[in-house]
Image (spheres, helix red, strand yellow):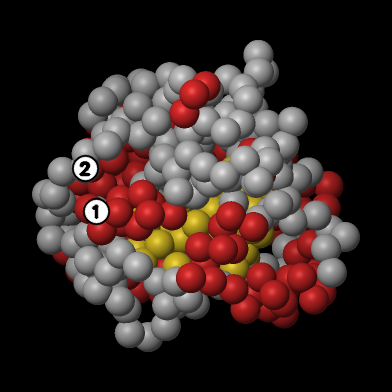
């Protein structure tokens, strides 16, 4: 991205990201009413929302109106905004969007363990239903606070979301099994699919899903594939997750697709979901029913064409 298009300066360690593609084609399958995109980000064009110096990249603006237009183009009635790492623990941009769309949006925040109970409750009232640990990009919080924070959110019906490389999961399993809240693993484990489904990291992910009530996001295919732009090598990986725990999976676009060398087509990512899940009833479960439970959405979903 050209510096003129961003209110935030880049640096040698936080280079500019590519912008998402402007056009998204119509869905290639029947998206069920109430479908949810469970992983995307908003980035303000306002310099009044500064990015942290420790960030790993500098994203282009991805404001709320473009985000809502992306949801509509994908046929999604609902969305989950995930606090992007470049803002650290300053969740204001995400929270502002949640408060404007209480029936349609939910959020996952990034917080430190010294956050007050009052601030946590204010986030809950705004629509936050989880906290995120991002150990792959600068701006996240350390796993050192995982147990302390889990104890504080356990009574709120929240979960913990993890952006990590699943190859690190075997060493973390003893701690994760003991958490008093559900866990959600981003991007199908964010490890290269070329490692194969028999890899101990992927098997550890399957154990958490099968036996410990954890969840995973069917998202980020372009982050784990060597097959740009179609990601065909991800199909057996995703199907293994669907076979293991169809009631604890959600789908996400990962828009606006930050920190990557080649920009994927959001519509291609959406349509590949139908290859991973050929059965329409199962697609409804993953797109509608599962996120409604995990994120505590209202019983009656808004129409997918709603933009405001």
Q: Relative to the observer, which residue lies in front, 71 or 62?
A: 62
Q: Residue at x 39, y 30 (%)?
A: 19
Residue 304 lies left or right of residue 253; in this view the side is left
Q: Residue at x 72, y 37 (%)?
A: 52
Residue 222 in sight from this viewpoint? no
Q: In this picture, is 147 found above or below 298?
A: above
Question: Label 1: few (<14), some or many (≥20) within 10 Å?
Answer: many
Q: Residue at x 74, y 56 (%)?
A: 111
Spot occupied by residue 206 in the image (x, y as percentages of width and height): 50, 50
> What residue did someone put label 2 on?
24
Q: Residue furthest right?
A: 114
Residue 118 lies left or right of residue 76; in this view the side is right
Quadrant housing residue 142? top right
Residue 128 in sight from this viewpoint? yes
Q: Residue furthest bottom?
A: 299
Q: Do labels 1 and 2 touch, CB within 8 Å?
A: yes
Q: In this picture, is 277 found above or below 14?
A: below
Q: Residue at x 71, y 45 (%)?
A: 88
Q: Relative to the observer, which residue lies in front, 294 or 195?
A: 294
Dot 1: element: loop
Q: Relative to the observer, which residue lies in front, 271 or 303?
A: 303
Residue 120 lies left or right of residue 266; in this view the side is right
Q: Earlier in the sequence, mark 1 or mark 2?
A: 2
> What residue did someone put label 1 on?
74
Spot occupied by residue 221 in the image (x, y as percentages of width and height): 37, 36
Spot occupied by residue 121 in the image (x, y as percentages of width and height): 72, 77
Spot occupied by residue 109 in the image (x, y as percentages of width and height): 64, 58
Q: In which quadrant will I find the N terminus?
A: top left
């Amino acid at each position: 991205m050209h510096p003129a298009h961003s209110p935030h300066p880049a640096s040698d360690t936080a280079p500019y990201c590519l912008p998402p593609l402007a056009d998204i084609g119509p869905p290639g399958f029947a998206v069920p009413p109430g479908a949810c995109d469970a992983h995307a980000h908003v980035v303000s064009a306002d310099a009044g929302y500064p990015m942290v110096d420790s960030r790993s990249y500098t994203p282009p603006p991805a404001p709320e109106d473009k985000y809502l237009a992306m949801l509509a183009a994908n046929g999604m009635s609902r969305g989950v905004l995930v606090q992007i790492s470049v803002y650290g623990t300053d969740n204001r941009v995400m929270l502002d969007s949640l408060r404007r769309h209480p029936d349609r949006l939910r959020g996952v925040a990034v917080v430190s363990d010294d956050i007050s109970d009052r601030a946590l409750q204010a986030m809950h009232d705004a629509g936050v239903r989880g906290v995120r640990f991002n150990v792959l990009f600068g701006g996240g919080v350390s796993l050192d606070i995982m147990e302390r924070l889990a104890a504080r959110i356990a009574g709120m019906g929240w979960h913990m979301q993890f952006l990590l490389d699943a190859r690190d999961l075997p060493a973390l399993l003893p701690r994760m099994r003991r958490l008093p809240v559900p866990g959600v693993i981003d991007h199908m484990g964010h490890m290269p699919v070329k490692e194969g489904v028999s890899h101990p990291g992927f098997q550890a992910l399957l154990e958490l899903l099968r036996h410990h009530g954890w969840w995973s996001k069917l998202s980020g295919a372009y982050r784990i594939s060597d097959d740009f732009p179609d990601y065909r090598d991800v199909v057996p990986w995703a199907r293994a997750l669907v076979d293991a725990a169809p009631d604890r999976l959600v789908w996400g676009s990962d828009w606006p697709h930050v920190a990557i060398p080649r920009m994927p087509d959001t519509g291609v990512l959406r349509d590949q979901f139908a290859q991973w899940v050929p059965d329409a009833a199962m697609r409804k479960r993953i797109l509608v029913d599962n996120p409604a439970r995990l994120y505590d959405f209202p019983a009656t979903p808004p129409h997918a064409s709603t933009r405001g």
